[in-house]
Image: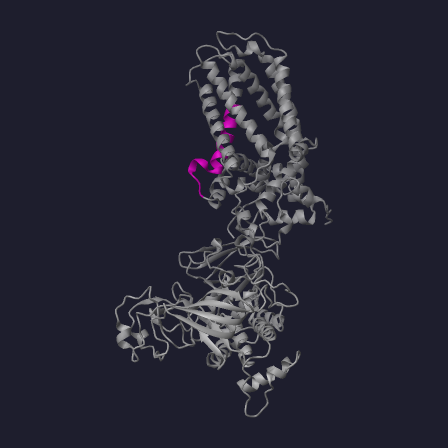
């Protein structure tokens, strides 16, 4: 089989943060020490080799990229201190940038200042766009949708979703196509027969339920390889809280809108704390804030070996998540304070702008792993796996 | 603490094979040599080895004659159990301060009968046997130790007085104190040798935790005819191993250990040991996990090929992790990089870590020579004059300069001796002329006449 070699591949990936992976002498320690390698997956050395040799197509078609949770055991034990864990992270950033055809992701990664400026400007545009249509600020109760019309937010939200959906789908299709071709998986394999469909559903459950939301291997295998920390600072837990919080808030928002559609409750009207939607939103918000705060703290303190190196992309995502969570919480606080505080209106505007930006930028930044990781995990689950060797 | 003063032409620090060779070469030329050794016996690491590659000579059989020659040489004063505290330039010579540590046994009176050892009730792990056998608190370091003089491990001693009663010559002296000695030396040879990288340096290998993970030096003792068990058994339960694994580069070429260099000897000693093991354990499977086999010396590649043809299994892989099973077996995890890159786990009865070489001592502790970044003595002319140091009148030899095998250590020790001889000029005391009159007067030797000296040396020693 002909292989196209791209000699610029390694220097290109290094721009995304790879440490001195050229120092690698291919001893295979990283692969053997990794708690996630098995018969079905051998990395990081295979991926490092692709980069060293310049096999760009093969690298981008590797589901292994997305299996790694960066516990850092390989970097810790690498005899050449070539930082294979950091390399895998850089290769994922490179992949996110490569799957995105708009080149926005590439800019966000490689030009941190410009990327941050774009992020700030985008939030400002969202805010100004909404503020342009603003109404009066009611002083008695916090009448948010008098201030910014609910329809405007709704339409803007739908528009953002459409853009994100298209960009996300394009990236998803690119990645799925590449991996499927390299794995020899076609439509027939996935949907060809009853058995195939059954297997696909099982794989989907494995990828989305057990591994993505359940974080089974992240929790069981990768955590064991890490240096011991207090339970409330474990990486999988913080990641899970952030993700569950995000999903919970998303669900609460959708449910709230659903209640309005059904005429049960108008969005933004006060309800008791035990009201299911509010309870879900409050708990999820608390999880998101705790998770992101601790993740930021971990990065600031370089608390474990997987956060020793932080890129602006890492900070951007955490900052957006944290701001969304905290402003949402402040908003709830403002909503239930006896007298409507004026700052509540501004927090509201800020919250909506940041949340929209978070969603809009998802396919172009670190958050894109939400799309790509489950796809890779799906391909893993399709194959009969066995770690017994 | 009493003081002594002594004058010498050359002070040789370290009495391993390099120090012995330098001392012998200088002494044969007529120079007075003071050979000092920090442990209680001369012989260094080589005397602990079973056999040596690639000739498969018995290590004791070729080391003990050198030890004996040095110990009995008219021009060599050998002091064991002696620390070098400082060596400072003093005009064109050096003033050295040494401490002769207290053995609690009078060396002049002790006759090496070992009655004190038999009487002593305290049993301790035997360092010379890789802590696999036992020794007493009153003991002679090992069977072929020179001098055959006892010493008392005073930290472990219970002061029962049994040794004192058993000693036929009243040599036991609990009141002995360390003696400070000031030495006026005209030149110095640093031959402080190496230590192996610690067994527990790489925690993933469970060395020092799992009983059946041993170092290659421990295996040398297991393979020795006079070793701790007299045969190859694994330490945890005395089982005869069916399957032995060698983990190469367990202390070398590893940035995480601060040892990025190749230790040069590990491939060859591992190959040698596997060949010896196939003799002592004919039914055992022997596997060597290696990154690269470096068989660079004369006859070394052939030696390696012989091992392969003997059925030793060589697997190109860096061992990433070793886990201990409840029965003491060890599970090794490796990537099979010469095939499809799959990760496999293999279970072995006994694992030998091919530990690397690091400096045996920090010469900067007592002398101001330049060292390289890893603590080995650095030569200003590493290519053209390896034994040179940054101080005039100070040479270095053997593994104090860097990892190397016995062949190279001895050659280098002779080179250092030659450099020192040139530096010193003709010896103050003309060498004794043998009766057959073959020796030449060293003072008449011109540069390049080294062969004449070598010839004389053989005659004199023979």
| Residue B143 covered by magenta stretch | no
Residue B84 location (% of width, % of height): 46, 66
Q: Main secondary structure of the magenta part?
A: helix
Could one spot residue B280 in this view of the protein?
Answer: no
Left or right: A131, with B100 as reference point: right
In the image, what residue occupies the spot 47% across and 19% down?
A277
Q: Residue furthest bottom?
A: B436
Please tell me how many numbered marks the rendered image carries.
0
Q: Which of B10/B223 is in front?
A: B10
Residue B78 location (% of width, % of height): 45, 75
Above-or-below relation of A220 to B457? above
In the image, what residue occupies the spot 68% across and 45% down?
A10
Q: Which of A204/B214 is in front?
A: B214
| Residue A245 covered by magenta stretch | yes
Q: Which quadrant of the figure contains the N terminus of chain B?
A: bottom left
Q: What residue range appears in magenta?
A: A228-250
Q: Which of B353/B336 is in front?
A: B353
Q: What colouring does the structure picture have?
A: one colour
């Amino acid at each position: 089989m002909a292989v196209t070699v791209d000699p610029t591949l390694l220097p290109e990936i290094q721009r995304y943060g790879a440490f001195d992976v050229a120092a690698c002498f291919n001893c295979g320690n990283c692969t053997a020490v990794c708690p996630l390698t098995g018969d079905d997956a051998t990395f990081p050395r295979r991926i490092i080799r692709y980069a060293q040799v310049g096999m760009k197509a093969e690298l981008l078609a590797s589901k292994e990229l997305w299996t790694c949770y960066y516990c850092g055991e390989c970097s810790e034990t690498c005899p050449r201190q070539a930082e294979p864990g950091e390399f895998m992270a850089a290769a994922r950033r490179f992949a996110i940038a490569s799957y995105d055809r708009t080149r926005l992701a590439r800019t966000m990664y490689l030009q941190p200042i410009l990327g941050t400026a774009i992020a700030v400007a985008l939030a400002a545009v969202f805010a100004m766009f909404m503020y342009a249509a603003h109404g009066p600020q009611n002083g008695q109760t916090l009448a948010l949708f008098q201030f910014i019309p609910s329809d405007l937010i709704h339409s803007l939200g739908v528009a953002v979703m459409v853009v994100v959906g298209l960009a996300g789908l394009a990236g998803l299709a690119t990645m799925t196509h590449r991996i499927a071709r390299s794995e020899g998986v076609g439509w027939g394999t996935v949907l060809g027969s009853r058995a195939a469909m059954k297997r696909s559903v099982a794989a989907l459950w494995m990828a989305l339920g057990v591994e993505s939301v359940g974080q089974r291997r992240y929790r069981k295998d990768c955590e064991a390889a890490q240096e011991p920390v207090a339970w409330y600072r474990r990486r999988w837990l913080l990641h899970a809280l952030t993700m569950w919080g995000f999903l919970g808030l998303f669900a609460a928002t959708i449910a709230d809108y659903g209640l309005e559609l059904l005429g049960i409750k108008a969005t933004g009207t006060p309800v008791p704390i035990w009201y299911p939607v509010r309870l879900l939103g409050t708990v999820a918000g608390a999880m998101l804030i705790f998770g992101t705060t601790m993740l930021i703290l971990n990065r600031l303190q370089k608390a474990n070996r997987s956060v020793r190196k932080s890129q602006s992309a890492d900070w951007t995502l955490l900052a957006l998540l944290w701001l969304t969570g905290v402003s949402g919480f402040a908003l709830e606080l403002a909503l239930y304070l006896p007298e409507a505080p004026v700052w509540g209106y501004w927090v509201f505007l800020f919250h909506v702008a940041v949340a929209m930006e978070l969603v809009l930028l998802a396919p172009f930044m670190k958050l894109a792993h939400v799309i790509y990781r489950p796809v890779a995990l799906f391909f893993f689950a399709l194959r009969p796996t066995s770690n017994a060797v | 603490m009493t003081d002594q003063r002594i004058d010498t032409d050359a002070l040789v620090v370290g009495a391993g094979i390099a120090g012995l060779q330098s001392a012998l070469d200088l002494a044969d030329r007529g120079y007075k040599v003071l050979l000092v050794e920090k442990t209680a016996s001369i012989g260094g690491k080589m005397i602990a080895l079973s056999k040596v590659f690639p000739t498969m000579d018995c290590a004791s059989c070729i080391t003990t004659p050198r030890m004996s020659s040095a110990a009995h040489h008219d021009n060599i004063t050998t002091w064991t159990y002696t620390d070098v505290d400082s060596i400072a330039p003093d005009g064109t010579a050096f003033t050295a301060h040494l401490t002769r540590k207290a053995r609690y046994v009078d060396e002049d009176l002790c006759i090496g009968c070992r009655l004190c050892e038999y009487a002593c009730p305290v049993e301790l792990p035997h360092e010379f046997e890789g802590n696999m056998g036992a020794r007493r608190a009153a003991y002679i370091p090992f069977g072929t130790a020179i001098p055959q003089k006892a010493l008392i491990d005073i930290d472990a001693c219970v002061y029962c007085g049994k040794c004192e009663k058993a000693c036929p010559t009243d040599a036991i002296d609990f009141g002995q104190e360390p003696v400070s000695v000031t030495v006026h030396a005209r030149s110095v040879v640093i031959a402080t040798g190496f230590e192996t990288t610690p067994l527990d340096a790489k925690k993933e290998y469970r060395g020092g935790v799992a009983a059946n993970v041993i170092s290659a030096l421990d295996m040398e003792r297991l393979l020795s005819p006079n070793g701790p068990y007299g045969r190859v058994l694994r330490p945890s339960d005395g089982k005869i191993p069916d399957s032995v694994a060698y983990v190469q580069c367990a202390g070398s070429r590893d940035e995480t250990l601060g040892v990025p260099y190749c230790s040069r000897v590990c491939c060859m000693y591992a190959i040698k040991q596997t060949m010896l093991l196939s003799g002592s354990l004919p039914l055992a499977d022997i596997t060597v996990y290696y990154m690269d086999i470096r068989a660079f010396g004369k006859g070394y590649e052939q030696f390696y090929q012989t091992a392969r043809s003997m059925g030793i299994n060589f697997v190109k892989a860096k061992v990433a992790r070793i886990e201990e099973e409840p029965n003491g077996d060890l599970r090794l995890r490796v990537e099979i990089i010469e095939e499809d890159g799959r990760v496999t786990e293999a279970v072995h009865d006994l694992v030998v870590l091919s530990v690397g070489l690091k400096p045996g001592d920090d010469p900067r502790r007592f002398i101001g020579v330049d060292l390289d970044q890893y603590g080995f003595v650095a030569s200003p002319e590493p290519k053209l004059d390896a034994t040179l140091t940054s101080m005039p009148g100070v040479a270095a030899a053997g593994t104090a300069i860097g990892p190397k095998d016995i062949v190279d250590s001895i050659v280098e020790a002779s080179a250092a001796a030659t450099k020192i001889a040139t530096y010193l000029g003709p010896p103050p005391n003309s060498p004794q002329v043998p009766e057959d009159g073959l020796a030449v007067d060293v003072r008449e030797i011109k540069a390049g006449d080294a062969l004449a000296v070598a010839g004389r040396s053989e005659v004199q020693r023979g």
